[in-house]
Amino acid sequence: MVEDGAIQRSWLVSLAVAAAVVGAAIVVSAVVNPLFGRYVHWDWMAGLAPTLYVIAVVALRRRWV
């Protein structure tokens, strides 16, 4: 649904931006957590990253963000 005549982003742009955002979040998590004496729980990231990726793609595509 397009509101106020806004044009939706292409799927390619949405996929690329979402991949960059989720990838950056994974890198930041892997770098920052050890600084606080914690480790990244990769089993959580295995479920969380793809979910966040799909949500980000849809949000970008529909211009919610």
Image (tube, helix red, strand yellow):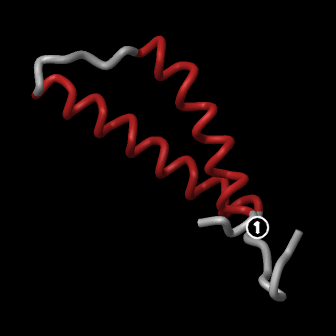
Quadrant of res 64: bottom right
- Residue 48 horizontal side relative to residue 63, left or right: left
Give the x, y percent position of residue 20.
Answer: 48, 51
Q: How many marks?
A: 1
Question: Where is residue 25, by image quadrant?
Answer: top left
Q: Name the amino acid type tagged 1.
A: Ser
Image coordinates of residue 8 in percent, x first then y, are 78, 73
Q: Determine which quarter of the picture holds residue 34.
A: top left
Q: Is residue 14 above or below residue 6?
A: above
Q: Mark 1 sits on what residue?
A: 10
Estimate the x, y position of residue 29 in percent, counting from the top left. 30, 33
In the drawing, does residue 11 fall left or right of residue 41? Answer: right
Which residue is nearer to you in this view: 61 or 4?
4
Residue drawn at 82 percent across, 79 percent down: 3
Name the quarter where the C terminus is drawn.
Answer: bottom right
Judge the density around disc 1: few (<14), some (14-19), many (≥20) Cα neighbours within 10 Å.
few
Kindly state the secondary structure of the residue where label 1 is placed.
loop
| 39 on left or right of 19 | left
Q: Quadrant of the N terminus?
A: bottom right
Residue located farthest toward the front when viewing the structure as drawn: 4
